[in-house]
Image (cartoon, rainbow, N blue to C red):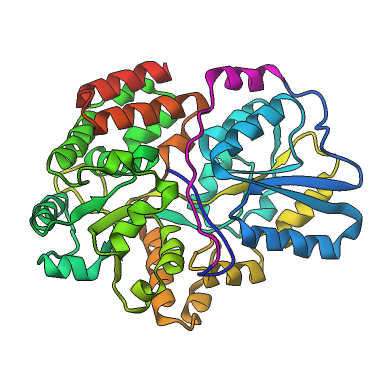
Amino acid sequence: MRRIPVDGNLTSPRIRRVIASAVTLTAAIGLAACGTSGPSTTSSAKGLTMWALSDQTILKDSVDAYNKDHPETKITLQLFANDDYKQKLRVAFGADQAPDIFFSWGGGALDDYVKAGKVDALPAADTDRFTPSVMQSATFGDKVYGVPANGLAPVVLYYNKKVLADAGVEPPKTYDDLLAAVKKLKAKDVVPLSLAANSKWPTLMYLEYLLDREGGSQVFTDIASGDASKWKDASVTKANQRLQDLAKAGAFGDNASSVSYDQGASTALLYTGKAGMTLMGTWEYANIAKAAPDFLKDGDLGYTAFPSLPGGAGEADSIVGNPSNFLSLNSSTKNKDAALTYFKDYVLNDSQVDAYLGAGSVPPVKGLESKLAAVKSSTDKEWLTFVYDLVQNAPGFQLSWDQALPSDQADPLLTNTDKSFLREISPAEFGENMSRAGS
């Protein structure tokens, strides 16, 4: 799961998550085959190029500030829509046309570039101001290959306070509470959990949490480390069974598979009172603030951690999501010193931290307690403190599976998650299929 915001304020462009792109095995092989030689032709002696997503307006401000101070080595920023970005980047690296600085989600996709010799490690002194658990997603072989570029994005359970109250439902604390809430909300003719299943990655969020609660974080850690046999672990089968049980119970309504996330329909079901809850990354707070400001202003939005699973091996406080997006350095750049200056002095500096907090997003920077206490809006302060505490108290922060795994496994992962959700395959077949895909 996996993507992150962010724009400049609560009413500006929506923050989204990454949709795992259909990066093909052929493209992955092409990257490895192109080796480490040959400069990036987009790099010049007079300036730098940088690629990011079009919704990263606060990040754009950091580039503007850098360019104002360094007219001799300006950064030319190119912004792309989310859906095709990963494929464009991979093709660009394969053709030695990649930018000097590039935006990524860390994890296995970034590690692919590191292994191909396409990314330079960064000085440790430039990265020790960031939250350690977040830096794990850009650290490979004890070296750091990216700096966080935006806010923390754990996945949380949003709910409509009025809808739940009308149905006599409390925010679920356990999986059994969740099943009971589904039954009561269905009786009120509302969708218990709005889900944009057509986009597939929102469904994956459920599977990630269910496995984390069922088997603990080590199961997927082993998978991400290359042990594909762990896909056939009993806890993976049980997690898929629980996902299918929720679907059979009517938790997601009758039309989830026709809803795409980018249409905003699944979020609208929540704030229009047609759904009781939705599971989504913290970027959704800004989307709701933009689409339904009165819903937020009236205090009707609630949020809580994903329910625990008593008897499961996982820890109740563990979270999944996107620790952050990252900016990394093309090893072929002719402007390494300028890029490092930008990373050190302009990315998530003091003014950038204030901007992210103002946008309802918590950046992965140490020691934000005093800034959180100074937030003027009580609604925003409550939200930001909830996210900050959620991350600070979490024993584990699992990067979204489709970002943590190598690129050639992301597509079969989403396909098999969708098939499991639709009950086109058995819970055990999910693990068998993924084990073959990862071998």
Q: In the picture provided, is 161 more to the left or to the right than 77? A: left
Q: Quadrant of residue 156?
A: bottom left
Q: Foreground: 414 or 392?
A: 414
Q: List x then y, in percent, for residue 179.
A: 12, 50
- Placement of the N terminus among the 4 image quadrants: top left
Q: Is residue 146 above or below residue 306?
A: above
Q: List x then y, in percent, for residue 78.
A: 72, 47
Q: Quadrant of residue 32?
A: top right
Q: List x then y, in percent, for residue 53.
A: 61, 48
Residue at the spot x=63%, y=27% of the render?
Answer: 115
Q: Is residue 147 above or below residue 31?
A: below
Q: In the picture provided, is 402 more to the left or to the right than 329? A: left
Q: Is residue 200 visible?
A: no
Q: Foreground: 354 or 162?
A: 162
Q: List x then y, in percent, for residue 285.
A: 41, 63
Residue 24 sits inside the magenta stretch = yes
Residue 118 sits inside the magenta stretch = no
Q: Is residue 230 above or below residue 150?
A: above
Q: Is residue 374 visible?
A: yes
Residue at the spot x=60%, y=17% of the render?
Answer: 29
Q: Main secondary structure of the magenta part?
A: loop
- Placement of the C terminus among the 4 image quadrants: top left
| Number of numbered discs | 0
- The magenta segment is 12-34
Residue at the spot x=20%, y=23% of the render?
Answer: 426
